[in-house]
């Protein structure tokens, strides 16, 4: 899917926003990092993370592992926003390329669903670092998510 | 490189262990997660992370993003252990596949250098989850690391 | 980098199109597959491949390995289009997700440079399958390319 | 899964070798490239490809796209070797890192199953280039395969 194309996504669960927000808040790692789920729309979610000593690498910038954890979570939320009710989503795999040093006061990870299948979804992951109000892309990724119906489990 | 082959790696910096340990301790994210650098050998490093609420996903298991952050860090340490003195290492990209739910009391991430080049290194990443003393593979990854000489910078 | 953002790319070598076309034509694999380099613009190249028995998988559709070979080549051409004169480009790594069965008469792979660095570039890869004049996304990828100056070699 | 560990794999279909060989021979791309399925064991398959003008990149070495096509196919065969009867396997995604220039007379791609699940399998991919009887690792990869029962389709 050309990542630049406009794709209209329709939620299968009318309560999708509530479901995604609850899933996010159950993630202890996101709470501990002080991450905020800032946008929940069908097929697209954003998570913001402020800079702190808790998220740094050896040169005092945002840690690549934390950047990718945020991206992973944003993609999972995006996939969940399009899932039917009573569905669990699990990351099958993901890959991240780092584009620039993440120097700034906040990072924002965006997950967007490129394909929403019955079993597997594919998400595009983008992370920007914000410094003095200016956003710079710092990482880009691709992710596979598996959906499992809680009813059949 | 066949991942199963034995490859003897020689450090270029005799102080490699000290360099790797210092780099690890400068990473605020690793400290905040309560991670420990348990093994530093030439071309192979291990990091352990105990379970806590700080590292969970929505079902109370280890978070995939945290698992991959640990794997990323283990690979970076492994690449650094083979670098010449005064070299910085940066993750170019990495990819993780999840193999099993990470249910246990500790995860251990191992980074191993498959190829150590002048500019780029490739690492194999393996993460086990330990429950009741039994290790189960829970993630596997591949990583590209870039080396930059601090002298030329 | 948000893949949906418009990025204006400037070629460093005024003869970039000629350089890219020559590089493409030197690739025996592309000739053998009957691939055509259809678009060469700064930071964006397209390659088309008609269906034939030579490119099928076990169910008679386009083979995933051939789809990714085309994507790899499109990304390499895109990176080369932005490189200084006398530069070699080599694929460091790439990753492809398949989105839909590639049933059709032609596939078109597009490589777009997301980041063009001195040593490393990152490309977005998109492959569409064309059936009865309708394009359907069938694969998406991410790629790291290394640039090496021929002069210094 | 630690890629270095010994894992004994048991086939679910006693006719696995016949099934894998038939699947391989139905792939027009493998025939056109002159590839040979040299090893079929439960969870591990090897494919060899002789050098020819048909498989070259711009400097006359084996093309990275062809190397990865071979690796993709070897992983798919390995996953199929462990599948129940009447199962289709499809590549969900894969990633390849290149380790060395592929200069030689033959490349050999090995696919090994790291995890064989009901729906998804994960494979390790290794490609060696053989020159004057000496094998050198030239690429390493990771792959996700989906299994679909033909009976339920």
Image (cartoon, coloured by chain):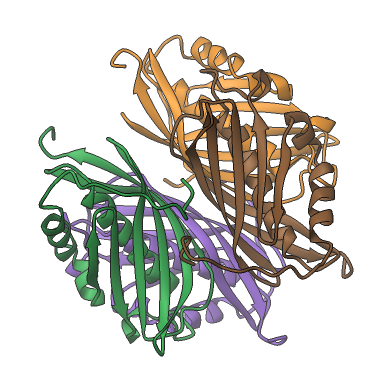
Chain colours: A purple, B green, C orange, D brown
**Is any atom of residue A115 visible in this view?**
no
B105 displayed left or right of A81: left
Residue in the image at 11% along x and 58% along y: B18
**Is any atom of residue D61 visible in this view?**
yes
Q: Is residue B14 above or below residue C90?
A: below
Considering depth in this image, is A128 or B74 the residue closer to the camera? B74
Q: Residue C135: x and y, percent? A: 75, 39
Q: Residue C39: x and y, percent? A: 61, 22
Q: Residue furthest bottom?
A: B132
Considering depth in this image, is C113 or D59 the residue closer to the camera? D59
Number of numbered labels in the structure image: 0
Q: Residue furthest front?
A: D133
Q: Residue A141: x and y, percent? A: 47, 52
Residue in the image at 41% along x and 45% along y: C1
Quarter in which the C terminus of chain B is drawn: top left
Considering depth in this image, is B92 or D139 the residue closer to the camera? D139
Residue in the image at 37% along x and 86% along y: B105
D71 displayed left or right of C151: right
Q: Residue B14: x and y, percent? A: 11, 49
Residue in the image at 78% along x and 64% along y: D148
A92 displayed left or right of D116: left
Considering depth in this image, is C75 or D14 the residue closer to the camera? D14
């Amino acid at each position: 899917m050309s990542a630049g194309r406009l794709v209209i996504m329709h939620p299968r669960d009318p309560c999708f926003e509530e479901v995604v927000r609850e899933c996010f808040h159950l993630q202890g790692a996101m709470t501990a990092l002080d991450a905020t789920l800032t946008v929940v729309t069908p097929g697209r979610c954003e998570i913001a993370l402020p800079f702190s000593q808790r998220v740094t690498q050896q040169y005092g910038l945002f840690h690549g592992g934390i950047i990718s954890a945020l991206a992973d979570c944003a993609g999972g939320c995006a996939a969940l926003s399009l899932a039917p009710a009573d569905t669990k989503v699990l990351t099958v795999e993901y890959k991240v390329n780092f584009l620039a040093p993440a120097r700034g006061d906040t990072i924002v990870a965006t997950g967007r669903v490129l394909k929403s299948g019955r079993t597997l979804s594919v998400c595009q992951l983008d992370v920007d670092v914000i410094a003095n109000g200016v956003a710079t892309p710092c990482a880009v990724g691709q992710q596979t998510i598996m959906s499992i119906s809680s009813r059949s489990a």
